Amino acid sequence: MLSYWEQKNFLDYDLIVVGAGFTGLSAAIHFKSLRKKAKVLVLDRGVFPTGASTKNAGFACFGSLSELVDDFWTMTPDEVLQLVERRYAGLKQIRKEFGDKALRYQSRNGFEILTEASLKTLDELPGINRLLKKLFAKEVFSQVKNIKKLGFSDQVKAVVKNRYEGELDPGAYLNALWSKASKMGIRILSGVTVVEIDQDSGRVIAERKEKKEIFEFKGNQLAVCTNAFTQKLWPESPLEPGRGLILLSKPIAGGIPWKGAFHLDKGFVYFREVEGRLLIGGARNKDFEKEKTTEFATNPAIKAHLQALAKEIIFPEKTLEWEMEWTGIMAFGPKKSPIIQAIGKKTAVAVRMGGMGVALGWQVGKEVAEVLSDM
Ligand SMILES: Cc1cc2nc3c(=O)[nH]c(=O)nc-3n(C[C@H](O)[C@H](O)[C@H](O)COP(=O)(O)OP(=O)(O)OC[C@H]3O[C@@H](n4cnc5c(N)ncnc54)[C@H](O)[C@@H]3O)c2cc1C
């Protein structure tokens, strides 16, 4: 039961954002920048954001060589360029906005490992570099010369470097978004699940299940930024969830002979060094159907596959011990581009980050704020 004061002060807003991940917080910040006096509320069901933003690998990436080669099967060259441009622009903007120190950004380059099966990708390297010339001052991809010193197994036949990729700490990025939102007077309420929205009136029904509490908020406008979990609020949304698993080793004795953000298997597998540990994740392609889920749980087959890659390809000479594992949920669809559109008189969505929300979230948040402003 709410008091008169609570009803008067806490329920009505100019904008209510559902979802407090990278995209939702970015949308709130950009909207508030456009309309300084607006009352903005962000709601999230988790105490911390509970989707992908604080569960990812922290690759500040825009597509490995083989991923981009693969994209040409489903997209035109212009579409591939647009996608890379949007992702890279997103990365540049967050670095400019928050600074490398706050993001714990490391410019250690991106790399892709090619085995016998994928070696032919090298033939495409000059052509892709030529195409990307429109966006980058220097050649993006180059072949690493001395790969022996990296300590990988003999199965690794070539390594391709991407000079424009880096790594960040996703928790630090979220902290930076929290600080900015709080300085701007944006209210964030966590631990409340939105169970219903009215896209035309801006009514939002939210609940705190364990306390059996129901809240009815009213937004002059709504932004749905719930990525993989959007179908509950917008059932016809053209997206499906894709779960991602990450394993973190204990610190590795004798150190790690490489640094940077590594891709493998057309970007489905990724690994990096985190404070002397190996972080490895992905491999959803090993069990696509089972991984189309919003449930946070480990698929044992995928875990075994990642552990085998770590042992057989990355550290053939070392014995690894594992410290932690976790999962997060992404959103995919028939197209790799995000959905940013109005879905009612008062509501817009910004969802389907396609597994690259570190780069996309800020820019997509900006675009949905503009859509709302024009409505
Ligand atoms: C394992 C893994 C590794 C990844 N690695 C990378 C990487 O290295 N680089 C990269 O660019 N991207 C990576 N990604 C993808 C990236 O993390 C996502 O694209 C990005 O975080 C999406 O941000 P978002 O804000 O759109 O969604 P989310 O972070 O999922 O935020 C959605 C929020 O909505 C909330 N929510 C959902 N439903 C409701 C509801 N009904 N009521 C209230 N709140 C609700 C959720 O709790 C959640 O906090 C990875 C993802 C995973 C899972």
Image (cartoon, rainbow, N blue to C red):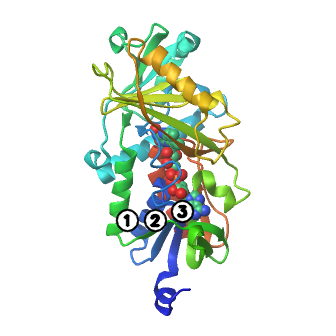
Q: Can you see residue 295?
A: yes
Query: What residue sits right under mark 1 in the picture?
Result: 181
* Image disc number at residue 28: 2
Quadrant (top left, top right, bottom left, bottom right) of the C terminus:
bottom right
Quadrant (top left, top right, bottom left, bottom right) of the N terminus:
bottom right
Position above or below: 107 against 370? above
Q: Looking at numbered disc 1 in the image, what kind of residue is underneath it?
A: Ala
Position above or below: 247 against 115? below
Horizontal and vertical percent for residue 371? 55, 64
Q: Looking at numbered disc 2 in the image, what kind of residue is underneath it?
A: Ala
Query: In front here: 221 or 316?
Result: 316
Q: Is mark 3 within 8 Å of ligand 1?
A: yes
Q: Looking at numbered disc 3 in the image, what kind of residue is underneath it?
A: Arg
Query: In the figure, residue 67 lies in which quadrant?
Result: top right
On screen, residue 271 versus residue 349, left or right, reads: left
Dots 2, 1 in contact, CB < 8 A: yes
Disc 2 and disc 1: Cα gap in Å?
A: 8 Å
Query: In front here: 86 or 115?
Result: 115
User: Measuring 46% from the left and 65% from the top, which residue is drawn there?
Assistant: 28
* Image disc number at residue 327: none
Disc 3 and disc 2: Cα gap in Å?
A: 17 Å
Horizontal and vertical percent for residue 311? 46, 17
Label 1 neighbour load within 10 Å: few <14, some 14-19, many 20+ = many
